[in-house]
Structures are given as C-alpha cells and as structure tokens.
Image: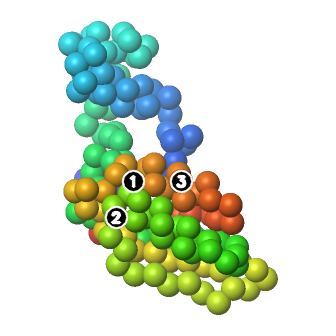
Amino acid sequence: MSDGSNYYVVKEKAVPEVLMKVVEAKRLLETGRASTVQEAADAVGISRSSFYKYKEDIFPFRDNVQGRTFTFLMQVHDEPGLLSDVLHVVAEYHANILTIHQSIPTNGVAMLTLSVEILPSTGDLSSMIKVIESKEGVQDLRILARE
C-alpha cells in the first residue's frame, strides 16, 4: 500500500494551473511581496484552502536537487561539436559530470546518457535543462533517474 509520497518529474505544461498558482503564492510569501497567505492567494487568484491543500505537495524543481545525481537520456544528432556544446552548458552551470555514454550513431542520431551531480554552486537545474533542450541537434531530453 502506498503512503502517497511517490514523486514524479513533469514538465510545467502538464501541471494544473492551480498548482502553478500555489508555487507562485509560495514565492510571493518567501520574497516578502505578500505578508499573509490570504494576500498571496488573492494575488495569484486562488482560495486560501487551495493554497493549504497543495502547499506541501508542490515545489520548484530547484528546491530539492542539491547533492543529488541526475541521469539524463538525450537523443542527439550526430553533429561535430554537439556533445561539446552540451558539456559546456553543464560546466557553465557548475554541475559535476560523473559519467558520459554516447551510442554509435544510427541514421544520424545517437543516444547520449549523462550523469550529473548537482553541487551547492550549481545554478538552476531547470534552466540548465532548458538551455540543453534548446541546442540545435538535441531532439529529446529525459530525466532517467534521480539519486
């Protein structure tokens, strides 16, 4: 029997609007732009009960990643310099690369598995993923594991 504490990583577009508003209300409270829950809830357009119902169940990805290892699976075009570009992004965000595995390209596409340790100095992981996904030649990026 499950205790209800399973975790999932989903893209923002798949998250219901009310949950995104709870995240925004929490941010308003954390930054001092709202001084009460009622003020924060009103500012984002949700009820206080919605805030309290979900406040412990959703948080930005960056809030729970330090000290973790993430393994990414990417489908990439076989283009000179693309792997270097991806690794450069990881270096710019000050994450520690633990393992790299790239398959032999088939029909001009290779599978790249990259394990990255998130350090206290690492920038926002969500932003790093977005930058990698935006690289021309990166067809798909998925998080395989989080340890």
Which residue is the site of mark 1?
Answer: 125
Locate residue 37: give its quadrant. Answer: top left
The one nearer the camera, 36 or 104, is: 104
Disc on the earlier residue, 2 or 3: 2
Disc on the earlier residue, 2 or 1: 2
At 36% from the left and 10% from the top, the residue drawn is: 42
Does 76 sit above or below residue 67? below
Does 122 sit above or below residue 12? below
At 43% from the left and 50% from the top, the residue drawn is: 126
Q: Residues within 10 Å of mark 3 (few under 14, many from 20)?
A: few
The one nearer the camera, 132 or 19, is: 132
Locate residue 93: give its quadrant. Answer: bottom left
Locate residue 115: give its quadrant. Answer: bottom left
**Is residue 135 visible to the viewer in this orientation of the structure?**
yes
Q: Callout 1: helix, strand or loop?
A: helix
At 50% from the left and 84% from the top, the residue drawn is: 101
Which residue is the site of mark 3?
Answer: 131
Q: Residues within 10 Å of mark 2 (few under 14, many from 20)?
A: many
Of discs 2 and 1, which sits in the foreground? 2
Instruction: Name the side, left or right, on which 82 lies relative to 147.
Output: right
Does 98 sit above or below residue 87? below
Q: Callout 3: helix, strand or loop?
A: helix
Which residue is the site of mark 2?
Answer: 95
Residue type at mark 1 is: Leu
Residue 6 lies, in percent from the top left, at 33, 55
What's the CA distance linking mark 3 and mark 1? Answer: 10 Å
- For the residues labelled 2 and 1, say whether their Cβ atoms are less than 8 Å apart: yes
Say which quadrant the C terminus sits in. bottom left
The one nearer the camera, 141 or 22, is: 141
